Image (cartoon, grey):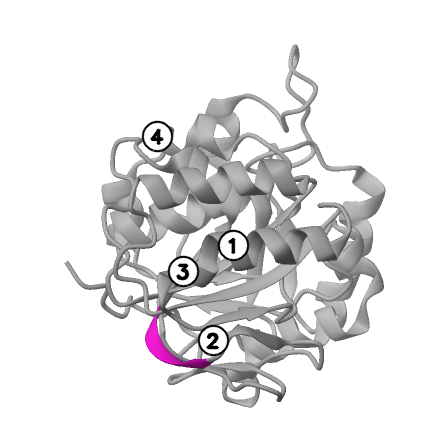
Amino acid sequence: MTLEPLARPPRLRPGARVAVVAPSGPVPAERMERGLEILRGWDLDPVVAPHALDTHPRLGHLAGTDENRARDLQEAWCDPSVDAVLCARGGYGAHRMVDLLDWPAMRAAGPKVFVGYSDITVLHEAIALRAGFSTLHGPMIATDVFLKDAATQEALRSTLFEPESVQTLGLDAAAALVPGTARGITYGGCASLLAADAGTPRARASARGGLLVLEDTGEEPYRLDGILTRLLRIGAFDGATGVVCGSWEACGPYEGVRAVLADRLGGLGIPVVEELGFGHGPTALTVPLGVPAVLDASSGGRCTLTAQVPALV
């Protein structure tokens, strides 16, 4: 089966109501408030989900119980007064609650702006495969990159309100690891989460016609080698038209990371771009998932990823 474009949600307007949820790790209240202030400065009306500041009673790495984290996300999605659902942070926990969501109800509610990355990769994949909706691989509002980096903030703000203005993405550092040009439907996210999700019920079975968006954090080159090798062995890249790499923050010296990427991805026979500028790095551009796009991996020049339609309608 070839990947097809997914249903895109409406763009935001001034005064839009946005729900902030914590599907994974616990969120410091001070960071949450700083993120909310930025959203208010964009003339948005943010509301914090009931359990977004919880911590699991026994497992301190989780923001509340699985049931409560799932309930927050589902209720926000199905609330017709909420125009967008923004994640506060990643961490760990989305795998534990993804099967607790009422997917028929969320699908019936229709597409809605959904933003996050890292552990949120599990939810991006589930929303794409179980609901058929496009989402945004973008910064979470209680993380350092969103709170401190103006370019990250502006990329998200522009995507939410003026998506036509940011259809072409790529920082100056973006370069061709394997040159060429590719067209396909964007999908993907955090490499370790894609590997963890592979083989589970309802996981993606085909990458045919897809442009893979890939990044990670805290994975030493040998561990990244193992993650990519697992994805290769299960055929996760079969049929993909290109690979778009973002940041590999805290994954060791980049020379070692690049060597692994070249070794594991270079033999696919498709264009590969490195350091496009999304993920856990110092700047996190907002990348639409589930949309047709063109990857320009021209040798010797700055590489870009261009969405052929605006991220939001």
Query: Marks 1 and 4: in contact by CB < 8 Å?
Result: no
Task: Please report the residue visible at 73 percent of the width from the left and 56 percent of the height from the top.
Answer: 254
**Left or right of 125 in this view: 141:** right
Q: Amino acid at mark 3?
A: Gly
Measuring from the top left, give residue 52's x and y in whole percent. 63, 37
- The residue where tag 3 is placed is 267
Q: Amino acid at mark 1?
A: Asp
Mark 1 and mark 3: Cα distance apart in space? 7 Å
Whichever of labels 1 and 2 marks the residue nearer the N terminus, that label is 2
Asked if residue 106 can be seen in this view, the reply is: yes
Whichever of labels 3 and 2 marks the residue nearer the N terminus, that label is 2
Q: Quarter of the image holding residue 284? A: bottom right
Callout 3: SS: helix
- The residue where tag 2 is placed is 11
Q: What stretch of residues is rendered in magenta?
A: 180-185
- The residue where tag 1 is placed is 263
Q: Which mark is residue 99?
A: 4
Q: Residues within 10 Å of mark 1 (few under 14, many from 20)?
A: few
Residue 84 counted in the magenta span? no
- Establish if 242 lies above or below 220: below
Q: Amino acid at mark 4?
A: Asp
Closer-to-camera residue (177/136): 177
**Left or right of 35 in this view: 54:** left
* Nearer the camera: disc 4 or disc 2: 4
